Amino acid sequence: MEGEKQKVDQVRQLADLSHDRYKFIHTVMDGFVVIQNHEIKANDEWLKQRIESRRSERMSIFIVTGGEARINLNMQDYNIKENTLVLMSPNTIMSMSSIKKSCTLSGVSFTIDFMSEIGMPEDATAIFSFFSSRFSPIWNIEKEDTKLINQLIQRLVEHTAKYAIHPFGKEILIHNFFIFLYELAAMSQQYSKMIRMNFTRQERLIIAFGNLAREQFREVRTVKKYADQLNVSAKYLSEIVKEYSGKNASEIINDLVILEAKFLLSRSQLSIGEIADNLNFSDQSFFGKYFKRHTGMSPKAYRESEF
């Protein structure tokens, strides 16, 4: 029983939520959680014990479908109520100031690792721009849009349930997750409110690094070479990237390389040697060792597992 309680508490922490019922949590992939109709009661004793500020490790998007509360995000107080959308990026400092009426929430919480695993869309910058500190983390949206978000979350719940029994369960779930993100990106044009005109110096650095890494990861795999292009030290670049994303710069670069390698292994007719050349490894053996170090399996084993 004690082990089961610890496991449940871990799930609560992953979702950055707190409650004594667990039917609202749906997860089948590491780093990805769907929360539906989670009620936070005004007299929730478990919540009261955790009322102090805590730092989120995930990107989280929640819609309030009932009740009213006051939360604090990065030392700023916000009132949330029905039709309020809440956005939290990694490292957001969050606390629940008060609960006026029991709040019901639905939403999605996911890690940077999860996004790296499924593959960032080419227009990721546009999709995730509303997570920037330039914009308010709170949207007050129309009922029709709340309804749409709830419908999209319901689809995610349904496809989470079918994940293991449908031959393309993983692909359909990821596809619906991207639809969810694209719909939010479209809504951001109406609801996202700018609270600062410019990105911080650190945000500009991260955006520039991300753009360079996506362009050059096939040829450039050392943090120092990116840092030199950005006129900062490798240590500073890694520290800032880690602070904002939860990963250091080297891990981001490796994620891009491995993601491309997985794509070529599973979706192309290229030989493993040709893929090694495509990614500018000195030889197939070095590529194989690199791939196995980061995935736990050889390129050949990974290719066979995908067919």
Image (cartoon, rainbow, N blue to C red):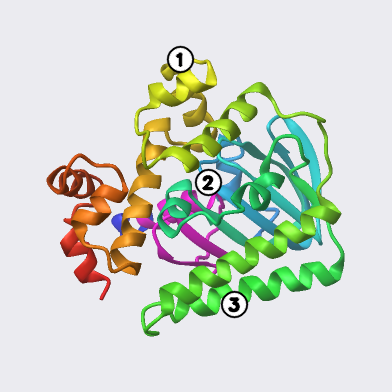
Residue 53 visible in rendering: no
**Looking at the figure, which quarter contains the N terminus?**
bottom left
Q: Quadrant of residue 30?
A: bottom left
Q: Along the line of sight, which residue is nearer the eye, 296 or 53?
A: 296
Answer with left or right where residue 145 lies relative to residue 25: right
Q: Is residue 27 magenta?
A: yes
Label of residue 233 in the image? 1
- Marks 2/3 in contact by CB < 8 Å: the verdict is no
| Three-letter amino acid code of the residue under disc 3 | Arg
Q: Earlier in the sequence, mark 2 or mark 3?
A: 2
Q: Nearer the viewer, residue 194 or 224?
A: 224
Q: Residue at x 53, y 80 (%)?
A: 158
Q: Residues within 10 Å of mark 3 (few under 14, many from 20)?
A: some
Image quadrant for the C terminus? Answer: bottom left
Q: Which residue is mark 3?
A: 155
Q: Position of residue 138 (x, y in %)?
A: 77, 47
Cα distance, mark 1 to mark 3?
A: 45 Å
Residue marked by disc 2: 58
When the figure is inspected, residue 18 is found, relative to residue 28, above or below; the finding is above
Q: Residue at x 51, y 15 (%)?
A: 232
Q: Secondary structure at mark 3?
A: helix
Please state the extent of the stretch shown in magenta in the rendering: 7-35
